[in-house]
Amino acid sequence: MRVIPSSELIINEDGSIFHLHLQPEQIADIVILVGDPGRVALVAEHFDRIECNVSNREFNTVTGTYKGRRMSVLSTGIGIGNIDISVTELDALVNVDFATRREKSEKKRLTLVRLGTSGALQPDIAVGEFVYARTSVGFDGLLNYYAGRNEVCDLALERAFTAHTGWNELLPKPYFVDADPTLTELFRDTTREGITIAAPGFYGPQGRWVRIAPQDPELNRKIESFEYEGRRITNFEMESSALAGLAALMGHRAATICTIIAQRIAQDACTDYKPFVREMIRMALDKLATLR
């Protein structure tokens, strides 16, 4: 079995993994991912008991229990690159023996649920709604760097989308990955199902125009009009595709739920969205406490 070189998996002197600064025993099997480090406290304030609180850079982790169920909450920061770091290191914490630097023969499956914020791309989706990404679309290209990409992607949906939009060959090839079906069923009655785009930036990649015009000013219109087997693309955010894709490749359960804080069609945004986020957190914790 392959020994993972120290340059590929960096372990700190205290036995913690390089970026997250976590040791294997400090992570729970259920991990809630949030972008904003400040949002970790919003989740952890509901915990019955706190085991540990570990911070490094934008990565802040609190592990504890909620209604007797052990959980962790981790801030990833913004963007696909940080999801690549977070999911890879979480997987290594449970599936790699740090002493031998070899994969464990028996793999552990994590449940990874991202709770984020997002902008709606359909006029009937209101600010304050919770959108569950049944399918995540990666505009970032991250999954294209990994072996097995096609085995976890919906290639028919991908082909239909690229044809509909006249996808520019200079852009990364988009990929479409479904959330874990168990989590889809778990959150079915408390969220709106959607197809969520994860963009590699907040401005141009999401069609925003401040001083530099987007390469294709009609791309958002094409996205909004796309339909596949009665399903529409519902919202933009910046992390869900890498989470869904990497989790599928590694054998973990993953899903993304976003509170809508902007209506891109109505060109409106809500800056006082914390009450909506708090409600989403309470809902997600209660659901995850019942997960089997």
Image (tube, rainbow, N blue to C red):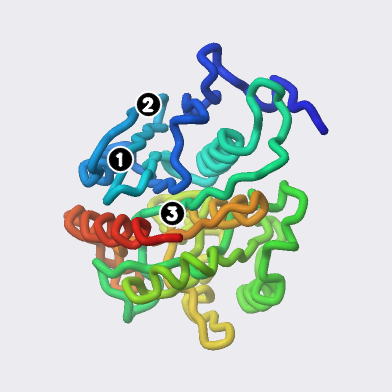
The mark nearer the N terminus, 2 or 3, is 2
- Amino acid type shown at disc 2: Ser
Instruction: Please give the residue where the numbered disc 3 appears in the rendered image.
Output: 113
Residue at x-position 49% and y-position 26%: 23
* Callout 3: SS: strand
Picture coordinates of residue 29, whole percent (x, y)? 47, 45
Q: Which residue is mark 1?
A: 40
Report the disc number at residue 116.
Answer: none
Nearest to N terminus: mark 3 or mark 1? 1
Q: Position of residue 53 (x, y in %)?
A: 33, 28
- The amino acid pointed to by label 3 is Val
Q: Quadrant of the N terminus?
A: top right
Callout count? 3
Q: Residue furthest bottom?
A: 230
Separation of marks 3 and 1 at Cα, in angstroms? 13 Å
Q: Residues within 10 Å of mark 1 (few under 14, many from 20)?
A: many
Q: In the image, 203: left or right of 48?
A: right
Q: How many neighbours does mark 3 have within 10 angstroms: few (below 14), some (14-19), or many (20 or more)?
A: many
Please tell me which residue is depicted at 60% across the width and 64% down the height of the picture: 177
Q: Where does label 2 land, which residue?
A: 55
Q: Nearer the viewer, residue 165 or 5?
A: 5
Q: Earlier in the sequence, mark 2 or mark 1?
A: 1
* Nearer to the camera, 270 or 18: 18
Q: Residues within 10 Å of mark 2 (few under 14, many from 20)?
A: some
The quarter in which the C terminus is drawn is bottom left
Q: Label 1 near label 3: C-beta < 8 Å?
A: no
| CA–CA distance in space, label 2 to label 3 | 20 Å
